[in-house]
Amino acid sequence: MGLFDKIAGQFIDIIEWNEQYSDELVHRFERYEHEIKIGAQLIVRPGQKAVFVNEGQIADVFSSGKYTLETQNIPILSTLKGWKYGFNSPFKAEVYFLNLTEQLDRKWGTATPVILRDADLGMVRVRAHGNFSYKVSSDSEMLSRLVGARHSFGPEDIEGQLKSKLVSSFSDSIAELNIAVLDLQAQYDEISEFMAQKLSTVFSDFGLTLLGFVLENVTVPEDVEKAMDQRASMGAVGDLNKFSQFQAAQALEDAANNPGMAGNMMGMMVGGGLAGNMGNVLHHEEPSVQVPIMICPKCSAENAGSAKFCGECGHSMSPENEFCIKCNAEIAPKSKFCSACGAPQQAKCSECGADMTPNSKFCGECGKKSN
């Protein structure tokens, strides 16, 4: 600082910080050799705090308002060293203005993937990002730990370390909450709230208050994302075996409607070893059919219901056929004589002439005993 600055400093009696176009968190008011005249005007705007520091110790703190720096209304100023020139003499002190406004929409994210152990997918690499907001809350912590003798301190000076803490807290929170990777998207709010609680102490140690924290998105590698999509599709399908059968039947139907495609499809099935599997799948679902059994009227052997002749004796299985009452040979229905032995198949009563069956012992009309 040159001679002009020294002379100009003697005439400046207003101490203020217009941070309208500044993103600083802490700003030191510059004055030649830090000399402040008694009677100077201190202006602290809304959202600011002014801190007087003498030899590294906080001497006084002023909230928003306008102040006249006099010993009568600010007794603590009288304790500052170098007070020996009388009422209007200058005293030495550093004045720091703290920006108390909320720092909105500060971005955070994982610079490199975070490895998580998942019960369903095993070891998974994930990335996460979101935003947070904070403000300066403790002037003593901010000045003693971070600012020191610097004339300016901004978000870029602290947020690198804060974001490292955020990423570490993310991996710890997922492990503590025991949330599967497949369920992360449904738990963003719960994760955000849990992380905010863990991070509040971290911000407080730096003289900051965490006002908001949001986990916006969690992403996984492309191959894991495909596996998750396939798993979701399987869940939507339900019974995979039935779905495979449905697809196979639909493919066969399409092939039947397109003769040219049928040949190609069968060739692919045979070449890929799918024909046998397809047959097994379709055969597996075919309901079992109970085949009816018929008893041969001649030899009592069991035969399939569709058989026309007995497999044991060759006898006809048709219920409409008749047999000779004498030789048991097959004859046409309602035959009067056997075609094999000539025996009559129907008799008449000698008394009344009524028809009688050959084996009848008495007439059904008159009761006379047959001959």
Image: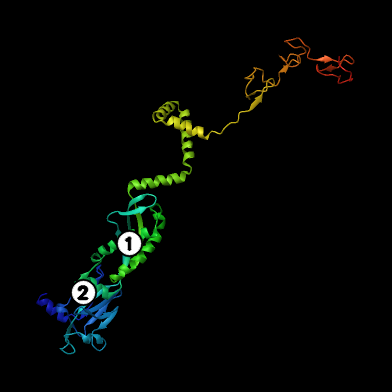
**Numbered disc total:** 2
Which residue is labeled 1 in the image? 169
Q: Of discs 2 and 1, which sits in the foreground?
A: 1
Q: Which residue is mark 2?
A: 28
Q: For the point 29% across and 57% down, which residue is it?
A: 110
Instruction: Please provide percent x and percent y for residue 278.
Output: 46, 32
Q: Residue at 42% of width from left, 31% of height from top?
A: 274
Q: Is residue 355 above or below residue 235?
A: above
| Quarter holding residue 289 | top right
**Looking at the picture, which amino acid does disc 1 mark?**
Ser
Other-residue count near label 2 (Cα within 10 Å), few / some / many at <14 / 14–19 / ≥20: many
Note whether residue 202 is visible. Answer: yes
**Of the pair 170 and 149, the residue shown nearer to us:** 170
Above or below for 189 versus 86: above
Q: In which quadrant of the rendered view does residue 296 lie? A: top right
Looking at the rendered image, the quarter that the C terminus falls into is top right
Q: Amino acid at mark 2?
A: Arg
**The N terminus, quarter of image:** bottom left
Give 357 or 208, whichever is nearer the viewer: 357
Q: Nearer the viewer, residue 302 or 137?
A: 302
With 10 as the anchor, is 62 left or right in this view? Answer: right
Rendered location of residue 69, percent (x, y): 23, 84
**Marks 2 and 1, how far apart in space?**
33 Å
| Residue depicted at x 23% and y 66% | 157
The quarter of the displayed image where residue 185 is located: bottom left
Image-based side of 241 in relation to 324, left or right: left
